[in-house]
Amino acid sequence: MGTVNRIQRCNGDLAVFSALAVAVLSALLLFLPAGEAIAGTITTCSGCHGMPPVDASFRAISTGRFGGNHNTHSWASGGGSNCAKCHRMPSTNYHRDGKINLAGNINNSPVQARYRNMTTVPHNATPVFGTCSNVNCHFEAVTPTWGGALFSAPADCNRCHGAPPSGGATGAAGSHAKHDQYYAGAANCQKCHSNNTTFSHATSAGHRNLNISFAAAPNNGSGAYSGALNDYLPSQPNAFGSCTATYCHSPGNKASSFDAPNQAATWGGSLTCTGCHKSNNASGDIIASGSHSRHVNATKFYTIGCTKCHAATVNSTMTITDTSAHVNGKVNIRFNSLTTAVNGTYGGQATPYAKDPGTAYGQCNNVYCHSNAQNNGGVGITYTQPTWGNAGSGACGTCHGTNHSFAAEIATGSHTKHLASTVYTGTARCLMCHNVGGLAFDGSCNNSCHSATSKHTDGRVDLIFPSNFGATAVYNGTPRPGDGYNTCSNISCHYSTTTPAWGTATPITCVGCHSLAVLLASGAHAKHISATAVPTLYNYTANRSTAGEYDFGCSNCHPISSTNHYNSAINVTLKNNEAGVGSLRTKNSATAVGINVANSGITGTSKTSIRCSMTYCHSNGNPNNLIYATTPDWYGGSFTGDRCANCHGNAPNSTIAGSKSHYNRKFLGYTSMPGGHQIGIHAMGIYSSPSGLAKAGTSGRSSHGNAATATTISCNICHYLTVTTARNDDNTVCKTCHYAGNTVGAQTGNLAAIANKSKHVNGLVNVDFKPVTMLSKAQVRQKYYVTHAYSSVWKRNGGYKVSGSHDSAKTPFNTATMWDGSTKTCSNIACHNGNSVKWTDNDGATECISCHGSL
């Protein structure tokens, strides 16, 4: 700054010297022709050449004028003493010796200054003028040739010290070049220096202090400079100081009584944005005034560039693009037209807007950054009006709603349905569709949003699904706000189907996601649900099985509560005491929830391999002693071999025991094998003659195998509405005869099948007698047949113990008259010779005498 002042002071000390020198020379020439003194006639300097000498283009004897620049180098007062600045002043008129005597150091300059490096110059009528060097008046620069064109201010300030000074002979560069970018031209030197256009400004250089003044705007009289003020000539040290209390180097937040800058403004130093008011996040010295911290500080999650709101001043590289919009006594606000803030206003004013520093903060409006992005329906936009410096007015939730306390949750499109229908809470719900940070989703607010704030207020609705919800999940619309709504695909929440368009008012039914085609192809669903009847509600616990297919409600295997829905996991549970479960689940033995959790009854890996082991559906069905089977793998497994025996045994079979009456060892059945209601009445203990037992076969004497003489007792006799076939050649005992190529004529290929699935796995023991007449080869002797009650129950056919002979029940089976479900009692039934027998009477309670009386 000091160098600029020097420039303004300097228009021609050397010229003064030169003019005076020529004047003296001219006076001497006047005296020489006479060759003698004329003392007494001319008594003052002006008698010969004027005082000060008057400039002319030639030597005019009549007027005393001669060449040079004496007029512009003369002082208004001081007389001959002023001539001494450039000349050795005579005490007499000895200078009429044909020489012009010059000072050994013109104007007593700090560095020896001379004209043509001489102290005496011969004069003549047509002199050749020279220059001065090192003279302080010209800032120690080589002067123009004496007698040349006159300087004018401020056009010729640069003829001495540079405008602005730039180092070397032009004056110390300091920070002049930087300041000239803001306040160009010599006229603006007054920002830091008083207006110096006088002759004394030049002649006093080096003999006075540097003129520093901050009177002009924008400092308006405030400011001080700490450096030395007497060393500004090029030959001097030029040590620099600092400026304080100036607006130019303040945070720019006040119009007066300026706050100190962030860093001292040392002349000749270099400052960035952080020097005065701090800067962006990358600077490491982050501006915090107003709401700056919330916008540019990474610890507050955003690093928005200054150019977004101050586009008239700075660009994206933090370079000042228009100095007229910087350090101008205003806060210049202009929203960047290349960003989403293009149509923004501040304080109700369109931008660019110049706000007076220190005045109250205003509101932003029409900026996408503070909007709901798009209105309901995906068309239009609603702006909020946050007040700068008021954190609450622009906090999360004030634009489009979150679960924060500042506003109600977002309700556009299908947000309400989705936010209310998930097990997750808080902002974790947002991450299910807007995982902009790409972080692993764990059901918590994992700062995914805060780690990728560049995707917030970026002019896009960024739909990024965590892999938990579908590795290939995608939104099928454009991310551009206002483009309306579209569908999603491959979302696990929707069972990887294509969803209805976002915002669809009609609720999605179960099959909207779980279409039958998809369900039936998934795991073992096809064995558990209807192929035609669609699920209707999530917490569906009923058993709607029909004769032809099973149809178990979803919540027989899945949670009742919908909070476990849409969470990207396949939640399965067999827990028997969950509120609202159906009757089938209450019969499970599972008491815990989870996979591979003790007492949950579920093991394996979700979506890969799952087995159940505590479910009533796969048990022996005996309410007095439930035994639970382990199921095949849900994904691709199946029961093999004797399918019935996999769950409840298949008489005669004891691998999974049912009620004891099925396996009464004292009566029917094979020797040393559990007996019971199977094969036929005493089928394996019928004597065909005194010599031996009758064997199974197809002859008239066979104990079992000829339907014309002996009814086969199997599951179908008592559970006829459930099972209608008597034969099951996958039963391990039956297969001893019923195999391909057998020699006794046993039938093969008659697998047991469930005739009515609504009567199977329904939580009940359905007793329904087959309405047939019982046939038996177990004939009692004729005399007992007549004397005992047998004849009242049985009819004898074809004689006794002969081929084709057999007894037949006089009354066909009738469930209504022969079975009391409340007491589990059979009565009036030929199998027990008309006696009443309780199903629970076993292990000795029912013996031979219970049916036969005495034999």
Image (tube, grey):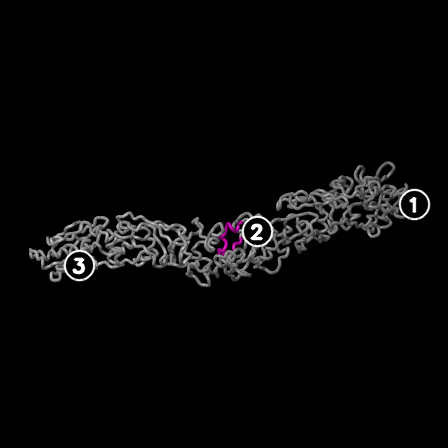
SS class of the residue under badge 3? loop
Estimate the x, y position of residue 130 in percent, counting from the top left: 17, 53
Going from N to C along the chain, the mark reached first, 2 or 3, is 3
Rounded to the nearest angstrom, the CA distance separating label 2 from label 3 is: 93 Å
Region of the chain picked out in magenta, as a range = 447-463
> Are discs 3 and 1 less than 8 Å apart at CB?
no
Residue at numbered disc 1: 786
Judging depth in this view, the residue of 458 and 211 nearest the camera is: 211
Asked if the stretch drawn in magenta spans residue 460, the answer is yes
Residue at numbered disc 2: 428
Estimate the x, y position of residue 173 in percent, counting from the top left: 30, 51
Identify the residue shown where x is 74% and y is 44%: 626
SS class of the residue under badge 1? helix
Q: Amino acid at mark 2?
A: Ala
| 689, above or below 216, in the image | above
Identify the residue shown where x is 11% and y is 60%: 61
Q: Amino acid at mark 1?
A: Val
Q: Nearer the viewer, mark 1 or mark 2?
A: 2
Rounded to the nearest angstrom, the CA distance separating label 3 from label 1 is: 178 Å
Q: Amino acid at mark 3?
A: Pro
Q: Residues within 10 Å of mark 2 (few under 14, many from 20)?
A: many
